[in-house]
Image (cartoon, grey):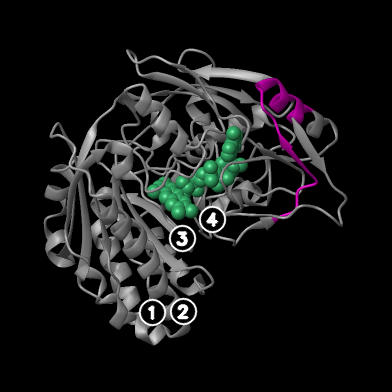
Amino acid sequence: MLAVPSSSTERARWSNWAGNQVCAPTEIVHPSTEAELADAVARAAAAGRRVKVVGSGHSFTGAALTDGTQIVLDRYGRVLDADPVTGLVTVEAGITLRRLNAELARRGLAMPNLGDVQYQTISGALSTATHGTGITHGNLATRIRAMRLVTGDGSVLECSREVEPEVFHAARVGVGALGAISTVTLECVPAFDLHAVEAPERLDGLLADIDTHVEGNDHFEFYWVPHTGWALTKRNNRTTRSPARRPMWREVYEDVVVSNWVFGALCRVGRMRPQAIPRLMRAVPNTGPVDYVDRSDRIFTSPRHVRFYEMEYAVPRADGPEALQRVRDLVHRSGLFLSFPVEVRFVAADDIPLSPAHGRETCYIAVHVYRGMEYHQYFSGVEAIMDDYGGRPHWGKLHFQTAETLAPRYPEWDKFQQVRARLDPTGTFANAYLDRVFGPIGS
Ligand SMILES: Cc1cc2nc3c(=O)[nH]c(=O)nc-3n(C[C@H](O)[C@H](O)[C@H](O)COP(=O)(O)OP(=O)(O)OC[C@H]3O[C@@H](n4cnc5c(N)ncnc54)[C@H](O)[C@@H]3O)c2cc1C
């Protein structure tokens, strides 16, 4: 274990991927075993310091910030056990999704669904209810079958549906409030390929027949291109067709040159000359159709080099089209110039207390602005719309809610708070973000 204590004047400064959250921890610890992880928590708690485990820093909120002990799990990311028959795979919490996907593929396994990128750690992704798209698929945390948690006093607690079921029920999406996740057992599926079809379509036609698209594909999503009537659609379906990967030049051209370099240049021009954005956006739907087959994780995730700020809301699936139309009206009326498409995804209902998809089939609507651009007017306008549908924010993405406004949106809020009060009675894992979104411990 490497601990880097520093004086308050020389503290190492940490910032997240988007660069909008910074902190200066008193000490930074890199445990490489569960015993070292537990020891780091116990020592910090005994010294009255708060503790935060940080993943890859891909949250836009202050969820991972601390001025106490920062625990970095970059030496704690191995696969501990993998059973190709049951699909049960146990990993250390710091494994990145990229490494997990590669390790699963080597064993003939895969995650049944993933989000857009694979930079996150598994524990960071699970803690904020990271999700992909596909109406028969829950968010990533619905695949957890067991966990080991280091709680506020440094002791280790194992939980599953059979052992400590109340803790397990809540801890699958814990937003870092219930302890330090040490290991996770996930139920994976046999490896599979996906057939990806991407094409621009008119937004109005798409929304008129949205259920057919959502139910007729394993994984359907679309991006509405602001200032236009177009949407870029993505349909990913399981296939047994032999892989027809894009040639390397095409993969680099589409995923790096167009999606990152050209798009990044468009965003930079837009930041300097916002009035030019609507004209630039009209060029986006001309990127042309895409059709190929590849390994599932290579289809689900792609590189993201253009940095941005993001807010994402979960609303009941049936309200999604209307909520999106209202976002479209807001953009039209407000005179905002937006260089980032609005992403729309669909996820199955689940039973996890703090999952934004708790108890309802969900439509996720995500809005972004290029890093360094003002987002308050846009995001607060969108949030006001989502409030009308009982919208629940992504825990890792920007929002302006508080415990008071959030509690009524989660039927099992109190169950979560009870587990929090039991596992972390003195607030060792608290920080300003958790104080804001959950309120005082025991509330
Ligand atoms: C480019 C980009 C693309 C994204 N795409 C998607 C997407 O497609 N779908 C989606 O839903 N989200 C997406 N996100 C959001 C991202 O998945 C979440 O914010 C996720 O939590 C980030 O994981 P991380 O490892 O970076 O964790 P961090 O952001 O570092 O931490 C997130 C939270 O997890 C806690 N945590 C981390 N490890 C532990 C642990 N071992 N024990 C206890 N708590 C822990 C932290 O304390 C913090 O509260 C995206 C973000 C970016 C920047």
Q: 10 Å neighbourhood of mark 4: few (<14), some, or many (≥20)?
A: many
The earlier-in-sequence mark between 2 and 1 is: 2
Can the viewer see residue 134? yes
Name the residue beneath numbered marker 1.
337
Residue 140 falls left or right of residue 178: left
Q: Find out if the beta carbon at label 2 lies less than 8 Å from the nearest ligand 1 atom.
A: no
The earlier-in-sequence mark between 3 and 4 is: 4
Q: What residue do we see at 79% from left, 34% from top? A: 44
Q: Could you say which quadrant of the image residue 207 lies in?
A: bottom left
* Amino acid type assigned to the residue bearing label 1 in the image: Phe
Q: Secondary structure at mark 1?
A: loop
The earlier-in-sequence mark between 1 and 3 is: 3
**Whole-percent x, y for residue 69 in the image:** 75, 41
Instruction: State the separation of the CA atoms marked 4 and 1.
Output: 21 Å
Name the residue beneath numbered marker 2.
271
Q: Find out if the beta carbon at label 4 lies less than 8 Å from the nearest ligand 1 atom.
A: yes
Along the line of sight, the residue nearer the viewer: 19 or 143? 19
* Amino acid type assigned to the residue bearing label 2 in the image: Arg
Q: 10 Å neighbourhood of mark 2: few (<14), some, or many (≥20)?
A: many
Q: Find out if the beta carbon at label 3 lies less than 8 Å from the nearest ligand 1 atom.
A: yes
* Amino acid type assigned to the residue bearing label 3 in the image: Glu
Q: What residue do we see at 20% from left, 72% from top? A: 229
> Quadrant location of the C terminus?
top right
Name the residue beneath numbered marker 4.
60
Asked if labels 4 and 3 touch by Cβ distance under 8 angstroms, the answer is yes
Instruction: State the separation of the CA atoms marked 1 and 3.
Output: 16 Å
Name the residue beneath numbered marker 3.
310
Q: Could you say which quadrant of the image residue 199 lies in?
A: bottom left
Asked if labels 1 and 2 touch by Cβ distance under 8 angstroms, the answer is no
**Whole-percent x, y for residue 174 in the image:** 54, 36
The earlier-in-sequence mark between 4 and 1 is: 4
